[in-house]
Image (spheres, grey):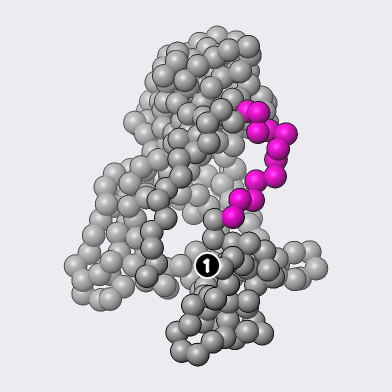
Amino acid sequence: MGIRKHKPTTPGLRMRKHSDFSEITKAKSEKTLTRPLKSSGGRNNKGRITVRRRGGGNKRKYRIIDFKREKFDNEAEVLAIEYDPNRSARIALVKYSDGEKRYIIWPAGLKVKDTIISTSESRANIKPGNSMKLKYMPLGTLIHNIELNPGHGAVFARSAGGWAQLMAREKGLAQIRMASGEIRLVKEEGRATVGRVGLGEHSSFSKGKAGRNRWVGKRPKVRGVAMNPVDHPHGGGEGKAGQGNPHPVSPWGKPAKGSKTRRKKATDKYIVAKRNKGKRRSRR
């Protein structure tokens, strides 16, 4: 793994930073573990755009990832590490002793020919790729692929470089410190995988040009202050006028730029400490 930079022979290469793909060991995906993926272009079942700035991009096949790890007490050998166009992380192809193959999120440090296991009611070795219930893990363990509801599959810490840390256990709940600084409670019966997700350099990558965004299906974004008043509440004005509105809003008047949107008050009791708030940089 490493970051590849280019000589600035073109404007698009000047700022581009991307993976050297040295960790990839297999180019083609496993046919039995892929399915077609249809692009919606941000439109709903009535054909109306409900998510803006989506469209185009190369065709993809969806890789079926095993987020539940419910094949218990059965060792699996890592056959290959592959690229997945649908996520920032890499995926690992594993083969169980009964011959079944599955994809999992690739943890940092897991290599081809290594063996991993997912235990049901016991503790496994604390090494990358092994999966077990939170109640069997030592405190302080770095983990990823964390279940919020036991048996429903992993929902936390799945992207490239993602991690969390098991801090404490009490009354059937485990205290998890997320990478954002948030500390929250999850049921200790839920499962997690040891280690952190591979490709931690992903946050340092740079596409280098707008065209690469188009290749992944992202369309351009136009600022509200660059529009006319009929198109956006921030539009209009003479010359390079500011937004004018002391409360920044979306085109439909919904508060934007930092306004709180969390409404799940029923789960607030599970958040012990809120995430760290980054310093907002001045745009002047």
Residue 248 in magenta stretch: no
Question: Would residue 91 be seen by someone viewing this image from the given angle?
Answer: no
Secondary structure of the residue carrying numbered label 1: loop
Residues in magenta? 259-270
Q: Position of residue 272 (x, y in %)?
A: 56, 28
Residue 267 in magenta stretch: yes
Of residues 31 and 92, which is closer to you in this image?
92
Q: Is residue 163 above or below residue 9?
A: above
Question: Which residue shows up at 57% across the image and 39% down it?
Answer: 65
What residue occupies the far right of the structure in this picture?
46
Specify whether 10 is left or right of 211.
left
Q: Quadrant of residue 12?
A: bottom left
Residue under numbered circle 1 = 218
Of residues 173 and 75, which is closer to you in this image?
173
What residue occupies the far top of the structure in this picture?
122
Q: Is residue 24 above or below residue 170?
A: below
Q: Quadrant of residue 111?
A: top left
Of residues 17 and 275, which is closer to you in this image?
275
Question: Which residue shows up at 25% across the image and 76% down it?
Answer: 10
Q: Position of residue 159 (x, y in %)?
A: 48, 43
Quarter of the figure with the N terminus? top left
Q: How many marks?
A: 1
Q: Position of residue 98 (x, y in %)?
A: 57, 23
Question: Which residue shows up at 47% across the image and 22% down it?
Answer: 166
Query: Mark 1: which amino acid?
Result: Lys
Quarter of the figure with the C terminus? bottom left
Q: Position of residue 2 (x, y in %)?
A: 26, 47
Label 1 neighbour load within 10 Å: few <14, some 14-19, many 20+: some
What residue occupies the far front of the structure in this picture?
246
Question: Which residue shows up at 56% across the image and 19% down it?
Answer: 174
